[in-house]
Image (cartoon, rainbow, N blue to C red):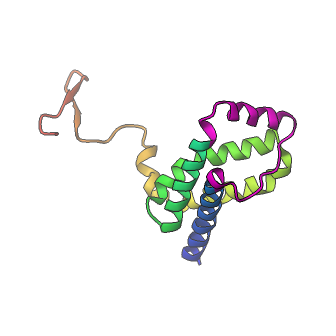
C-alpha cells in the first residue's frame, strides 16, 4: 500500500505542477482574479516581469521530474518553497483556496517523508566530507589528496 500511495502522491503532485507550470506559458486554464491584498501581492509580482515566467518554468520542470520519477528529491526540494508560499498566500490573503493549499502541502510532506533518506545529508549539523580536515590547532587544512 505504501508504494502505491507514494506513486499516486508523486503523480498527483507532478500533474498539478506540470499543468499549472505549462499554463503559465500557454494560458489554457482560466485563472481566477485576485481581490484585495491578494491582488496587490500578485500585482507586485507581476510588475517584476520575471517572477511568473520563472515560477512557471520551475513548476513545469519540477512537475515533469516527479512524473517521470527522475530527481524526485530535488524536485521536492525545489517545490517546497513554492508550496509554502501557496499555503501562506491562502492562509493570509486568499482564504478561499486553503483546501487546495492544504492538499498540496500534505502531498509534499508525505513525499518528503517517503524520500527522507535522500534528505538526511542535508540535515547534518556539520560537514562530514573528507576533502577538508582539521589540523591540531583547529584550523581548516585542505586535504592534499582531494582533487
Classify residue 41 as left or right of residue 26. right
Q: State yes or no: residue 43 in magenta.
A: yes
Q: Residue at x 77, y 52 (%)?
A: 31
The foreground one among 54 and 16 is: 54
Residue 69 image offset from top left, x and y in percent: 47, 66
Residue 34 image offset from top left, x and y in percent: 83, 42
**Up-down: is 143 above or below 123?**
above
Secondary structure predominantly adopted by residues drawn in magenta: helix
The foreground one among 11 and 40 is: 40
Determine the residue located farthest toward the bottom in the rendered image: 1
Q: Residue at x 81, y 51 (%)?
A: 97
**Is any atom of residue 79 visible in this view?**
no
The foreground one among 5 and 136 is: 5
Residue 135 image offset from top left, x and y in percent: 19, 26
Q: Residue at x 54, y 75 (%)?
A: 3
Count of labels shown? 0
Q: State yes or no: residue 92 in magenta.
A: no
**Up-down: is 28 above or below 133?**
below
- Give the magenta range: 23-52
Classify residue 74 as left or right of residue 144. right
Classify residue 147 as left or right of residue 2. left
| Residue 92: quarter of image | top right
Amino acid at each position: 500500500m505504501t508504494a502505491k500511495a507514494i506513486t499516486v502522491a508523486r503523480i498527483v503532485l507532478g500533474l498539478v505542477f506540470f499543468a499549472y507550470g505549462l499554463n503559465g506559458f500557454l494560458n489554457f486554464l482560466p485563472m481566477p482574479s485576485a481581490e484585495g491584498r491578494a491582488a496587490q501581492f500578485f500585482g507586485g509580482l507581476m510588475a517584476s516581469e520575471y517572477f511568473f515566467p520563472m515560477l512557471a518554468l520551475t513548476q513545469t520542470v519540477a512537475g515533469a521530474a516527479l512524473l517521470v520519477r527522475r530527481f524526485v528529491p530535488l524536485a521536492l526540494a525545489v517545490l517546497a518553497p513554492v508550496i509554502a508560499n501557496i499555503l501562506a498566500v491562502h492562509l493570509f490573503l486568499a482564504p478561499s483556496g486553503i483546501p487546495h493549499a492544504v492538499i498540496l502541502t500534505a502531498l509534499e510532506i508525505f513525499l518528503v517523508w517517503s524520500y527522507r533518506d535522500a534528505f538526511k545529508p542535508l540535515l547534518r549539523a556539520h560537514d562530514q566530507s573528507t576533502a577538508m580536515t582539521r589540523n591540531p590547532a583547529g584550523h581548516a587544512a585542505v586535504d592534499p589528496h582531494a582533487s
